[in-house]
């Protein structure tokens, strides 16, 4: 029995994940590792399968946004180092010890509280990466004094080990490098302040995909590879630079559920009757909608691929279905449609969809939710399916 009952699915090309890891492997210095960022369920691609493939292809560790995401990876049997990049409440740190997951810290009081929680539970020490805020304005210490306080608190702790220090860039994907260079200089100054205080520095990292592309020499001990892992560029500017050739890994496909031909001038389509089909137009109904994470902003604007050619979305995107106009009028039920990805000589890229709905390519795959199964391919063959609705 097929593991899903609706013919709408995401295809993830694991060969693309592998190729993208190897591209960055060759782009950054040999001594720089690769930390594959698989937060948000692998940017919508599936964190377990993408994480496994990235590690097999040369990544050294994984990163996620929250401890819950790291637990999923450990429960799937992944034993590689995992770093939680976001905030973890001190009261919630026990699983990080039990499953040996590294956490991020930037506050001496948090260190003391987390140390007490682990001490009272009699658990093993947890590795901690200190986050510095050099200009992202999100999480992290901002001054050398704060930083030294956190380092000293970690050194006094018996249940937390200082294993890394990092920062995150806000504008590394832009042509004007003023901000990113200023952030890197601030980061270097903070690192130097610790060396001057006699501290030996653990793992150092600062590069996201954009900085890894533009400043590979800032790789330090590892880059944190997110969007580039999935074959997407952080910005149009980074794509135009063409420093690295990336292969998009995700496609979104469905099959026609119903076909009809407009018979008269009053043939309106979808809620609000915002589209009137001309007599003779062929309208196909597709089983995907905004409740799947396919944006309603594509109403009367988006396009899909049928038989290698474009078909316009007509009418409003519904919760579970959309309608498209088939120009050749040759469509039949069960014909395959590509919503994101390639078909024939054409491609509907995530960049194109993101521009249409006024967002960035990062958000488009992250929107695809639990209702859509992920089907994985390697060497052109299906290797597995993960369907959140029916599988744990
Ligand atoms: C702290 C942190 N680090 C790294 C990333 C990955 O960024 P890209 O997807 O742009 O590579 C995200 C993030 O929040």
Image (cartoon, rainbow, N blue to C red):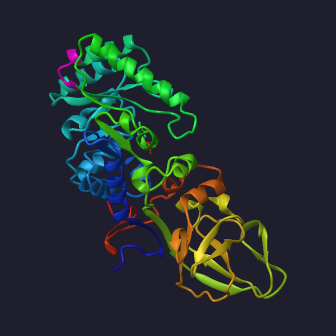
Relative image position of residue 73 (x, y in whole percent): 28, 50
Relative image position of residue 392 (x, y in whole percent): 32, 59
The magenta stretch spans residue 365: no
Q: Which segment did they paint magenta? A: 155-161
Does residue 119 sit above or below 77 in this rendering? above
- Quadrant of the image containing the N terminus: bottom left
Residue 360 shown left or right of residue 134 in the figure: right
Please tell me which residue lies in front, 384 or 7. 384
Residue 344 in view (yes/no): yes
Please tell me which residue lies in front, 119 or 105. 105
Which residue: 69% across, 82% down?
327
Which residue: 53% across, 62% down?
292
Does residue 147 sit above or below 253 in this rendering? above
Residue 41 shown left or right of residue 312 in the figure: left
Relative image position of residue 306 (x, y in whole percent): 58, 79
Residue 362 in view (yes/no): no
């Amino acid at each position: 029995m097929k593991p899903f009952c609706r013919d709408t699915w995401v295809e993830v090309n694991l060969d693309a994940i592998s190729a993208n890891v190897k591209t960055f492997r060759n782009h950054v210095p040999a001594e720089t590792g690769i930390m594959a960022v698989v937060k948000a369920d692998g940017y919508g691609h599936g964190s377990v399968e993408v994480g496994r493939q990235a590690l097999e292809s040369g990544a050294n560790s994984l990163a996620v946004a929250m401890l819950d995401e790291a637990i999923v990876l450990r429960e799937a049997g992944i034993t590689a180092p995992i770093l939680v990049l976001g905030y973890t409440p001190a009261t919630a740190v026990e699983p990080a010890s039990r499953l040996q997951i590294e956490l991020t810290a930037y506050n001496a009081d948090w260190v003391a509280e987390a140390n007490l929680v682990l001490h009272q539970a009699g658990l093993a020490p947890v590795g901690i990466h200190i986050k510095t805020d050099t200009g992202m304005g999100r999480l992290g210490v901002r001054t050398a004094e704060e930083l030294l306080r956190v380092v000293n608190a970690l050194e006094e702790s018996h249940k937390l080990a200082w294993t890394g220090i990092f920062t995150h860039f806000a504008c590394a994907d832009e042509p004007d490098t003023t901000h990113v260079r200023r952030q890197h200089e601030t980061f270097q100054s903070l690192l130097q302040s610790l060396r001057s205080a006699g501290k030996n520095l653990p793992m150092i990292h600062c590069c996201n995909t954009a900085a890894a592309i533009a400043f590979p020499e800032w790789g330090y001990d590892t880059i944190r590879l997110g969007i580039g892992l999935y074959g997407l560029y952080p910005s149009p500017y980074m794509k135009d630079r063409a420093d690295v050739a990336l292969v998009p890994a995700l496609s979104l496909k469905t099959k026609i559920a119903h076909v009809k031909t407009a018979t008269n001038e009053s043939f309106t389509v979808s809620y609000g009757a915002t589209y009137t089909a001309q007599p003779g137009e062929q309208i196909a109904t597709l089983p995907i909608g905004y409740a799947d994470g396919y944006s309603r902003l594509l109403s009367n604007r988006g396009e899909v691929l049928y038989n290698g050619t474009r078909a316009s979305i007509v009418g409003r995107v519904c919760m579970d279905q959309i309608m498209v106009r088939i120009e050749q009028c040759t469509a039949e039920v069960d014909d395959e449609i590509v919503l994101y990805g390639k078909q024939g000589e054409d491609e509907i890229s995530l960049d194109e969809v993101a521009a249409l709905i006024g967002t960035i390519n990062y958000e488009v795959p992250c929107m695809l939710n639990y209702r859509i199964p992920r089907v994985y391919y390697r060497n052109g063959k299906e290797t597995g399916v993960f369907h959140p609705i029916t599988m744990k």
